[in-house]
Image: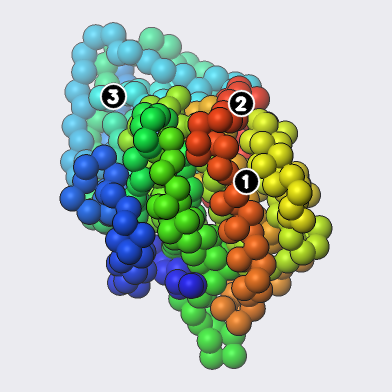
Amino acid sequence: MICRDEKTFTPGIDKAATFIEQEFQKASLQPWQNAKGFRQSFYMYRIKPVSVQLTINKEPRIPDNVIVQSTAGQLTWNQEGQVAEQHVKAGENFYERIRELRKHKGNTFVWVDAAQSEAFRQYRQYLQSSNLMADSANLVLVLQEPADSAIHSVNLEVRQQVTPLPLFNVVGMIPGSTRPDEYVIFSAHYDHLGIIPAVAQDSIANGADDDASGTTAVICLANYYKHHHPARTLVFAAFTGEEMGSYGARYFSQQFAPEKVVAMFNIEMIGKEAKFGKNSAFITGFERSDFGEILQRNLEGSVFRFHPDPYPEQQLFFRSDNATLARLGVPAHTISTDQIDVDSLYHTVNDEVESLDIRNITNTIEAIAKSAVSIVDGKDTPTRIQPESLAPGSAKKP
């Protein structure tokens, strides 16, 4: 069973989601958290700025030195008196700090130290090129000038065209029999690149390995575990928006307390033989918890082996949907077999079903199913990942 991945925001993504919903129904899964169906819907917004006018202490600011992150079509902020200020200081990790600030509610004013000017401009350029934003509070970033001191007044007027864009993960579950409030997640992403520049008149990036192979694994695991009566609640998730920056996984991670998630088996590109040979796969972030050790122990007597990630320079741990939950402390790892350093089909029109080793996919799914049993049954609990130990990295693929 291989389902074709489609690009987010295209009609094809709806067809792919419908197929996965039907497979979840056949596997007798229940909707997540008493939802009406398997789709977990949310929105992103395409933003087209029209105008930005900002004065601080009655002095106008250059628009190029201002970033407004808001999904409001029109935003007016007039405040006299002391303004609560946040800062991105010199020496701080710019992107980690912005990630923290986006959690604030209401209007948030942020001074960005001049030493961060290059990161500021890169971030502004990124926002202008993507024109996409998740729903968030109003964040105003201003590049600080030497003469700037305490703020006594802020006057901001923003006009922009905002187009809501629907997205949806596909999520089902098997309730746990004795530990229903402890979750084990099996996941993959079902979006891909869609139409790309043609090669020999073929312009469709099918995404058979990336990541229809992983989505197939999630569906097969749902069918396997429906007969198992797990102690812990099993959650089967097909994420959207991974290729754009793991937006589906980000939304998904907000739906429950991370401390209740015992483990996440994220499955990404298992359609080809690993560099270690047949009956093998690797686990990203192997050293960050004892997740991999537990899996290998459960395969004792089997020919299958799980290995640490052999491509540390690729930062794969940060480049798939496990990263969002890992940053929250969850033992969230990706299982893969792809030889990413030499895979000539990755992100091309030639990533098709004919290029896949179906036996490799089957063996890997069987190994995941068997190796996860002690975690599913509540006999093993992987150690937590320490968020402060995580080096900065991107959750978005190149």
Q: Which residue position is annotated with label 1?
A: 371
Residue found 20% across the figure and 36% down from its top: 75
Q: Which residue position is annotated with label 2?
A: 383
- Residue 50 % position (x, y): 26, 50
Dot 2, how many residues are within 10 Å of its Cα: few (below 14), some (14-19), or many (20+)? some
As drawn, the residue found furthest toward the right would be: 276
The disc labelled 2 sits on which kind of residue? Thr
The image quadrant that residue 255 belongs to is: top left
Q: Is residue 152 left or right of residue 143?
A: left
Q: How has the structure been colored for display? A: rainbow
Q: Which residue position is annotated with label 3?
A: 105
- Residue 127 % position (x, y): 43, 47
- Distance between the Cα atoms at labels 2 and 1? 16 Å
The disc labelled 3 sits on which kind of residue? Lys
Q: Is residue 299 left or right of residue 169?
A: right
Q: Earlier in the sequence, mark 2 or mark 1?
A: 1
